[in-house]
């Protein structure tokens, strides 16, 4: 058998294996060199695409949250499909001293996993979405808004000796017009399991325009106790 014939047979076998995986799993296979799971959508966002938007979106986040008592860090968010998949922009939202001290005036009733939960005002979440989604949609990227916990320096300054984490679910429910901790449709995926560790709102801004998404949000009152919109 010639070397060329062996190469052809090898290429043919590889194609048959890939086709077999697709037939058996219903999933596509992407090159391993891409760094994503072989079961991710090959048309989905790559690490390079997401990382290219981290810095400009961080600037938008900082502008939006200035003097609100909240901060956020932009990074690459992902799911696990036997490797990274569904790559998107992640907005990790944390309370700062101002939000923690304001929440204390109303009493910190909730305590999950040893940490106080500081409810994010729905108008703050909406302002972030209004600022970020046009850029994310233009870049064909989805966005995750994630409730995270304050760092040690903030806790010491606020004289909180357990933890203080962002409560995302109530504000997301107010904007989506739902009372469910789990809510999913073609645009929004709200993930909550009664623990601050799992509070996340995924927005399909890679598939829908910012105007379409923002047009679906509910109006929320500003500066109300229920929304914990502190000044």
Image: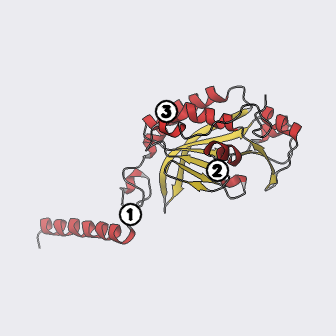
Instruction: Judge the density around disc 1: few (<14), some (14-19), many (≥20) Cα neighbours within 10 Å.
Output: some
Q: Is residue 197 above or below residue 142?
A: below
Work out which quarter of the rendered image holds the C terminus and state it.
top right
Instruction: Judge the density around disc 3: few (<14), some (14-19), many (≥20) Cα neighbours within 10 Å.
Output: some
Residue holding disc 3? 134
Residue 105 left/right relative to 215: right
Q: Earlier in the sequence, mark 2 or mark 3?
A: 3
Q: Earlier in the sequence, mark 1 or mark 3?
A: 1
Q: Earlier in the sequence, mark 1 or mark 2?
A: 1
Tag count in the figure? 3
Q: Nearer the viewer, mark 1 or mark 2?
A: 2
What whole-number distance in Å separates the C-alpha atoms at marks 1 and 3?
A: 30 Å
**Label 3 near label 2: C-beta < 8 Å?**
no
What whole-number distance in Å separates the C-alpha atoms at marks 1 and 2?
A: 32 Å
Residue 194 horizontal/vertical position (percent): 72, 57
Residue 112 horizontal/vertical position (percent): 79, 54
**Label 3 near label 1: C-beta < 8 Å?**
no
Secondary structure under tag 1 reads loop
Instruction: Judge the density around disc 2: few (<14), some (14-19), many (≥20) Cα neighbours within 10 Å.
Output: few
Of residues 127 and 173, the one nearer the viewer is 173
Q: Is residue 136 visible?
A: no
What whole-number distance in Å separates the C-alpha atoms at marks 2 and 3?
A: 24 Å
Q: Nearer the viewer, mark 1 or mark 3?
A: 3
Residue holding disc 1? 27
Secondary structure under tag 3 reads helix
Residue holding disc 2? 178
Q: Is residue 34 above or below residue 26?
A: above
């Amino acid at each position: 058998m010639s070397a060329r014939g062996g190469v052809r047979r090898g290429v043919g076998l590889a194609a048959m294996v890939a086709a077999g995986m697709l037939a058996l799993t219903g999933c596509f296979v992407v090159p391993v060199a891409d760094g994503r799971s072989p079961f991710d959508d090959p048309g989905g966002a790559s690490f390079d695409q997401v990382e290219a938007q981290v810095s400009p979106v961080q600037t938008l986040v900082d502008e939006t949250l200035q003097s609100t008592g909240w901060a956020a860090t932009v990074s690459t968010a992902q799911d696990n499909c036997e490797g990274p998949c569904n790559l998107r922009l992640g907005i990790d939202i944390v309370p700062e001293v101002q939000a923690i001290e304001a929440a204390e005036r109303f009493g910190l009733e909730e305590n999950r996993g040893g940490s106080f939960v500081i409810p994010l005002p729905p108008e703050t979440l909406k302002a972030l979405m209004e600022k970020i989604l046009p850029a994310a949609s233009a870049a064909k990227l989805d966005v995750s808004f994630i409730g995270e916990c304050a760092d040690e320096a903030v806790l010491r300054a606020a004289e909180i000796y357990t933890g203080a984490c962002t409560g995302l679910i109530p504000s997301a429910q107010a904007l989506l017009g739902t009372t469910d901790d789990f809510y999913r449709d073609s645009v929004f995926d709200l993930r909550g399991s009664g623990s601050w560790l799992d509070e996340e709102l995924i927005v399909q801004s890679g598939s829908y325009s910012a105007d379409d998404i923002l047009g679906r949000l509910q109006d929320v009152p500003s500066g109300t106790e229920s929304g914990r919109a502190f000044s």
